[in-house]
């Protein structure tokens, strides 16, 4: 049913085929207007007769994501809901707040600290053990693509023997929009059946894992149903594992192609957190998210009718030159301003602290274990590709 190599299948699914950077187009569109009809950077200028609009300026995107009453997330249910089940992604207030309050119990500071020491650190170092003596690696294939899915599997308490199957199902689920929808639905159903056994077991015998927390968590007497737990576990794959793989890979491209900034981080590890934030600003893993207008409104001088789809260009907003001077430049020392790579408002990424922690652990292990880490001079230059999802297809490095 599945290819032997989920990495190759995933690359084909995501169209990793050359550097088609969208940022010059974003800059031109921002200069013309904050909001455009259609999705012009993807070639849909008059998409569906004015029922779709795209916001490219930071202030416009920030306004949309901060106003959940005018710009609803419910539209995600029409596509992602079919695949993932009913999840937090498609909920508006007050339902969203009640549901998020339960889910947040699985992301406490205490749990995060435990995961870092007991789970993420050993997992990353174990993966580096497999290639540390080779003095040459493709960091994407051999570490950055795989470790976030393994983290999610470990957080959920999945048996180690199940990891290969879980990883393949995850790849099929994540590639839904670009490869084979029917196959993705099959993967979704297989994951649902798989999680059903785990959830049933945790209800009877709780363990120290995220599913055990979710089956016991409550807020004002409300608990998650099994189907809601299945939906959240499936959503963790694209929302957690995939975005972390992309953001950590993009950051490593930024550092390795700017040796002076890599040296600065190596000399002062306290710069790692701001390097992570600059990496997400400079190359966010996901370029767009969408909302639906609940009433007639106006944005950037453009009338938007009730029911219109409103696309938020996170990539463009994060490169808005009115907020970040010389915004195209990767610069970990630039004046720090909050980016919008984790979205904004009530739907700001629930797992953003986990993603930051995972990336910080991975970078620390790479810097500690691979002295003199640098681009492989015998390999082609790295590039970041994708018009919706951004990541390097490979990242060839050597070390001393």
Image: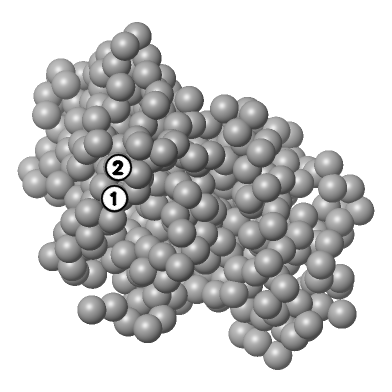
Q: Please report contact status of discs 1 and 2: CB closer than 8 Å, yes or no.
A: yes
Residue appearing at x 30%, y 37% in the figure: 229
Q: Which residue is mark 2?
A: 200
Quadrant in which the N terminus appears = bottom left
Say the numbered circle drawn on residue 64: none
243 to the left or right of 380? left
Name the residue located 57 percent from the left edge and 71 percent from the top edge: 140
Q: Can residue 15 be seen in this snapshot? A: no
Instruction: Give the residue displayed 80% in from the left and 62% down from the top.
Output: 367
Q: Of helix, strand and loop, which one carries label 2?
A: helix
Count neighbours of disc 1 (C-alpha within 10 A) and say few if under 14, some if 14 to 19, many if 20 or more: few
Image position of 189 with respect to 381: above or below: above
Taking the view exactly as shown, the residue that stands out farthest to the bottom is 378
Q: Indicate the quadrant where residue 87 lies.
A: top left
Q: Nearer the viewer, residue 400 or 121?
A: 121
Write the residue at 91% across / 53% down.
267
The residue singled out by tag 1 in the image is 197
Please, which residue is most extreme toward the top here?
220
């Amino acid at each position: 049913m599945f290819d032997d190599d989920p990495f190759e299948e995933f690359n084909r699914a995501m169209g990793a085929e050359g550097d088609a950077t969208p940022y010059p187009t974003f800059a031109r569109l921002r200069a013309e207007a904050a909001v455009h009809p259609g999705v012009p950077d993807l070639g849909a200028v008059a998409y569906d007769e004015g029922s779709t609009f795209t916001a490219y300026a930071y202030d416009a995107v920030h306004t949309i994501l901060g106003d959940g009453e005018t710009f609803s997330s419910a539209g995600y249910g029409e596509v992602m809901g079919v695949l993932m089940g009913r999840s937090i992604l498609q909920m508006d207030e007050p339902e969203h707040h009640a549901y998020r309050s339960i889910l947040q119990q699985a992301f406490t500071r205490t749990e995060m600290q435990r995961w870092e020491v007991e789970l993420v650190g050993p997992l990353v170092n174990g993966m580096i053990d497999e290639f540390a003596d080779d003095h040459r690696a493709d960091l994407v294939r051999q570490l950055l693509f795989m470790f976030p899915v393994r983290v999610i599997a470990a957080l959920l308490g999945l048996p180690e023997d199940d990891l290969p199957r879980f990883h393949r199902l995850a790849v099929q689920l994540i590639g839904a929009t670009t490869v084979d929808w029917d196959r993705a639905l099959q993967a979704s159903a297989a994951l649902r059946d798989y999680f059903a056994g785990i959830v049933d077991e945790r209800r009877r015998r709780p363990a120290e894992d995220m599913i055990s927390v979710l089956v016991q968590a409550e807020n004002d007497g409300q608990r998650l149903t099994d189907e809601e737990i299945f939906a959240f576990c499936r959503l963790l794959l694209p929302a957690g594992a995939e975005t972390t793989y992309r953001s950590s890979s993009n950051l490593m491209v930024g550092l390795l192609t700017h040796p002076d900034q890599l040296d600065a981080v190596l000399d002062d590890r306290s710069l790692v957190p701001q390097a992570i934030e600059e990496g997400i600003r400079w190359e966010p893993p996901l370029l767009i998210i969408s909302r639906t207008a609940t009433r007639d409104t106006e944005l950037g001088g453009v009338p938007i009718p009730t029911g219109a789809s409103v696309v938020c260009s996170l990539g463009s907003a994060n490169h808005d030159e009115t907020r970040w001077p010389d915004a195209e430049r990767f610069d970990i020392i630039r004046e720090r301003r909050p980016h919008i790579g984790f979205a904004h408002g009530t739907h700001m990424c629930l797992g953003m602290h986990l993603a930051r922690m995972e990336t910080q652990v991975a970078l620390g292990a790479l810097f500690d274990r691979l002295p003199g880490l640098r681009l492989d001079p015998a390999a082609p230059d790295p590039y970041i590709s994708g018009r919706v999802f951004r990541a390097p297809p490979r990242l060839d490095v050597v070390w001393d």
